[in-house]
């Protein structure tokens, strides 16, 4: 679903290892799961699947967490995923220069199998080795 087509009542998710509480703001300016440099955008999704990957692949210690978030400003399609492998924005992934407000947490999400996680990590490592791991920010 392209950003321009997102309904006003859409629920959004953000996967991380950061321990946050309702009302906290998640702001741009930090590294991501895929880049060591500070990023100008904060990334989020309308799908629990994409947020699950974010929570599982997040850098840091502790358990992965999935927060329900509200964008506080305009957002756009994530150019790193939109119209790449498949046409459109099939992962419903977005980004914003404005913070996301935490409005809740999904406590009972189900992660991927160890084999799926290993395959994803190996795929990300291959991209890095090929120099194809650049984040369009």
Image: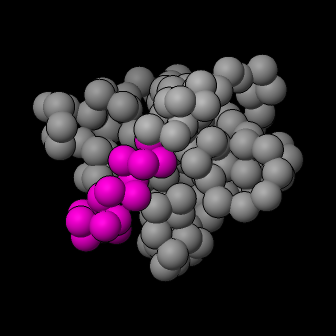
Which image quadrant: the C terminus? Answer: bottom left
Of the pair 101 and 111, the residue shown nearer to us: 111
Q: Judge whether residue 17 can be spotted in this image.
A: yes
Q: Which residues are magenta?
A: 120-137
- Say whether residue 47 is left or right of residue 103: left
**How many labels, in total?**
0
Residue 1 image point, x, y percent: 30, 27
Of the pair 79 and 101, the residue shown nearer to us: 79
- Say whether residue 115 is left or right of residue 122: right
Question: In this figure, which colouring scheme has been used for the structure?
Answer: one colour
Q: Is residue 85 above or below residue 30?
A: above
Residue 117 image point, x, y percent: 54, 37
Quadrant location of residue 22?
top right
- Say whether residue 60 is left or right of residue 56: right
Quadrant location of residue 85?
top left
Residue 92 image point, x, y percent: 37, 32
- Say whether residue 63 is left or right of residue 6: right
Q: Is residue 129 above or below residue 8?
A: below
Q: Is residue 80 above or below residue 34?
A: above
Residue 115 image point, x, y percent: 53, 30
Residue at the image position 66 percent from the left and 49 percent from the top: 16
Residue at the image position 25 percent from the left and 70 percent from the top: 131
Q: Is residue 1 magenta?
A: no
Q: Residue furthest bottom?
A: 37
């Amino acid at each position: 679903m392209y950003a321009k087509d997102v309904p006003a009542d859409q629920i959004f998710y953000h996967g991380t290892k950061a321990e946050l509480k309702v009302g906290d703001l998640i702001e741009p300016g930090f590294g991501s799961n895929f880049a060591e440099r500070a990023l100008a955008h904060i990334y989020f999704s309308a799908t629990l699947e994409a947020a699950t990957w974010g929570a599982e692949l997040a850098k840091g210690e502790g358990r992965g967490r999935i927060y329900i978030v509200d964008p506080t400003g305009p957002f756009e399609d994530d150019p790193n995923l939109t119209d790449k492998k498949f046409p459109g924005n099939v992962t419903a992934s977005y980004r914003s220069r404005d913070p996301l407000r935490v409005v809740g947490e999904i406590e009972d999400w189900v992660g991927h199998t160890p084999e799926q996680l290993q395959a994803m990590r190996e795929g990300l490592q291959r991209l890095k080795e090929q120099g194809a791991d650049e984040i369009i920010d």
